[in-house]
Image (cartoon, helix red, strand yellow):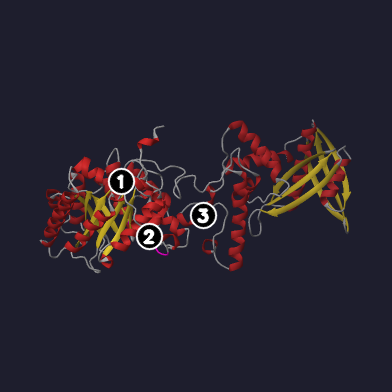
Amino acid sequence: MPQHRYQPAHERVALPLTDRTWPSRRIGRAPLWVPVDLRDGNQALAEPMDTERKRRMFDLLVTMGFKEIEVGYPSASQTDFDFVRQLADHGDVPRDVTISVFTAARRDLIDRTIASVEGLPRTLVHLYTATAPTWRNVVLGRSRAEVHELIRDAATHLLRRAEERPGADIRFEFSPEVFNLTEPDFVLEVCNSLTALWEASPDRPVVHNLPATVEIATPNVYADQIEYMDRHLARRESVILSVHPHNDRGTGVACAELAVLAGAQRVEGCLFGNGERTGNVDLVTLALNLYAQGVNPMIDFSDIDAVREVVEYCNRLPVHPRHPYGGDLVHTAFSGTHQDAIAKGLVQHAKQAAELGVPAEEAPWAVPYLPIDPGDIGRTYEEVIRINSQSGKGGIAHLLRTHHGLDLPQALRPDFSRVVQQVTDATGQELTHQELFALFRTTYLTPALDGPVTLVSWTTRETAPGTHQFTCTLRIDGREHSCRGTGNGPLSALSEALRTVGFTIDILGFTEHSTTPGPGSPAVAYAECRVDGVTCWGVGGDTSVLTASVHAVMAAVNRCTRATS
């Protein structure tokens, strides 16, 4: 491949910062998140949003708690203009939400933009012009001085138009598009001149938004560029330093996170990363990354599936199943080792919560393979472990315990895991927890009542302290036999009764438990038996512990009998 055609970043743009300090910093609070789904995201759609979809997206963003929302490019689209007017005319914008609108640096487009925001309570007008050398030379055909003059003329016109509305709360934002490929001294020259022109102050700051319009370097380079600007912007206390990373190299999230370390106070992006080419930085991932570090993201993602549903509807684009935090499969484990670790982690989490005397949803979270509790974002644990041919005994046991109250003995788990593997290998399909339980029932419970040896009737009684008698009628291959056995317990007496008709039985392991709390709970019993040299597990279930135990032994006997035949 002709890699010689391309230049590394340091040959394309000056990178003057050498004494960086951002690597030693930590993010302790969320920046101001500004969703641009209704403008930058919308203009990247094959089917741009109509007014109804725009309104649904806007309502979602307000509900989630965003305090500044870029709603459109009203001078470029009648739909966008009408949508901004609808928000203004209907009084639909909360008083604590600032509406941002986007415009190129042209007087006629600025006039149209100012007309669109008439009546809005709080407005940010976002002015942009490309400043990088390639864009100046190829797209604009202007020198540095000419581009600066173009920007300053537009910014002056914007200021005058805003001053014509003395009661309006209008602030300003400027983006030197393709900032990351623009000479740093030129960016400072332009931005500082606008800070002075717009008379920025701490109580009415300007926003200087520095986009990585096209990613061209590793995220540390962008962080260096942001820290350089953070140090050298004039009247820094009167400037909100904003970033707008794109995702051309797949590192938009990293660029934004390192930029915040480097001094950025504001981040523009889209929900789930929609946008031109490979998309804008994803605000969902950014915010929940902070959440996973114990930092309040200041945005509500407590029902992430509802958020995703609206975004998919409005964008008419699906969110990938593996998309961080919001995809269908991001909390799902198919791997056996992962499932086992998660299952053990969830048990330990419940135990720790009980020891602390707090609800499980308030206890500290430390479950393997799950960076955050899926319940915090509205997911259920049903999605965490799913069963296919790669699954292991831990995950299978977890689903049976969680959904059906079965706490499988450790020695039974690999046995059933092999049964599951045979089915999933043969079908190539995953099993739901209902299908998993049906397979378990068919394998271990049903043989008690449907096998070569069945109990027609039975009774047991204690004839003396420590001595039990088991009396029964057995049907073996269609013929009934009356049997009696004596032992130190009901199950040993059953074993002796079976011995009288030719079955040599050793009960190697036995355990039982209730499937739900409280009186009257169904019981389940597990018996590992060796019958004529063959070892099998059987399971029984009943409201009577004794009946469940007898059925477990009979299921094991029938499974062993079938295995030998």
Q: Looking at this view, is 142 or 206 the one in front?
A: 142
Q: Secondary structure at mark 2?
A: loop
Q: Secondary structure at mark 1?
A: helix
Sequence-first disc among 1 and 2? 1
Q: Which class describes the residues within 10 Å of circle 3: few (<14), some (14-19), or many (20+)?
A: some
**Which residue in the protein does label 3 denote?**
371
**Which residue in the protein does label 2 denote?**
262
Q: Which mark is residue 41?
A: 1
Q: Are marks 3 and 1 in contact (CB under 8 Å)?
A: no
Residue beneath the point at 22% across and 66% down = 204
Sequence-first disc among 3 and 1? 1
Q: Which class describes the residues within 10 Å of circle 1: few (<14), some (14-19), or many (20+)?
A: many
Residue beneath the point at 35% across and 59% down = 227
- Magenta: main secondary structure equals loop
Q: Which class describes the residues within 10 Å of circle 2: few (<14), some (14-19), or many (20+)?
A: many
Magenta stretch: includes residue 31? yes
Seen in the picture, residue 262 relative to 548 is either above or below; the reply is below
Image position of 564 (left or right of 387): right
Disc 3/disc 1 C-alpha distance (Å): 28 Å
Q: Which residues are magenta?
A: 28-33
Seen in the picture, residue 122 relative to 180 is either above or below; the reply is below
Image position of 328 (left or right of 521): left
Task: Give coordinates of residue 496: x percent, y percent.
Answer: 87, 45
Task: Give coordinates of residue 268: x percent, y percent.
Answer: 32, 54
Q: Secondary structure at mark 3?
A: loop
